[in-house]
Amino acid sequence: MARTRKEISSPAFDWVLIANASRARCFVRDADNGAMREQQGFVHDASRLKGRALEHDRGGKVHKGVASTQFAPHADPHDKEHQAFASELAEFLEQAALARLYPGVSLIASPAFLGELRSRLGTATLKCLRHGVALDLTTLQGGELEHRVTEALAAVAVS
């Protein structure tokens, strides 16, 4: 997992985490004008590997005389990696919440990954959670990203 660290944020600004199962970017966002500065980036390369490259173990069978036991089939390797990445991001947000680095955080993540991430959030993060939006914006940059984030957060604020 590769990380890039930019700068420490001011507690006056909310954070926005934009993520999918293999990449995430954390931004500090000014609610007044929608301007965002990237705080930290995450890349989870294992989520992009082919299934065979991820498989570490196999389900098995044990035969003993006439009786046999079959072990439960192993979980999908990609699911395991998505869960690991969601846990890593949740831990990052939890530590930042405990250190009071942000007053609020919004999650904007691909639909499947948003549920995975939410299920792993800690108590401190949940207290600061403002919005969760099922939308993958990880490939956007600059003004287009700021515009789409502003639209997405405005839409959930209204509903």
Image (tube, grey):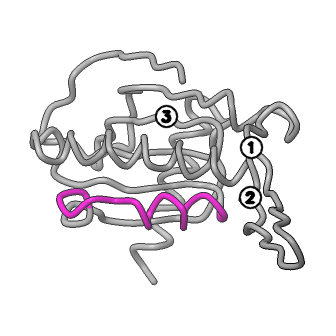
Nearest the eye: 119 or 105: 119
User: Dot 3 lies on which element?
Assistant: strand
Q: For residue 57, which numbered disc appears in the image?
A: 1
**64 to the left or right of 127:** right
**Closer mark to the observer between disc 3 and disc 1:** 1
Residues at marks 3 and 1, CA–CA distance in whole angstroms: 31 Å
* Mark found first going from the N terminus, 2 or 3: 3
Q: For residue 11, which numbered disc appears in the image?
A: none
* Mark found first going from the N terminus, 3 or 1: 3
Query: The disc labelled 1 sits on which kind of residue?
Result: Asp
Q: Looking at this view, name the residue that lies furthest to the bottom.
A: 159
Callout 2: few (<14), some (14-19), or many (20+) C-alpha neighbours within 10 Å? few
Q: Position of residue 43 (x, y in %)?
A: 58, 27
The answer to whether mark 3 and mark 1 are in CB contact below 8 A is no
Mark 2 lies on residue: 74
**137 to the left or right of 9:** right
Callout 3: few (<14), some (14-19), or many (20+) C-alpha neighbours within 10 Å? many
Mark 3 lies on residue: 25
Dominant SS type (magenta): helix
Q: Position of residue 87 (x, y in %)?
A: 44, 48
The answer to whether mark 1 and mark 2 are in CB contact below 8 A is yes
Residue 130 among those drawn in magenta? no
Callout 1: few (<14), some (14-19), or many (20+) C-alpha neighbours within 10 Å? few
Residue extent of the magenta highlight: 111-125
Residue 123 among those drawn in magenta? yes
Q: Is residue 5 above or below residue 44?
A: above
Q: Residue at x 74, y 48 (%)?
A: 77
Q: Position of residue 94 (x, y in %)?
A: 25, 48
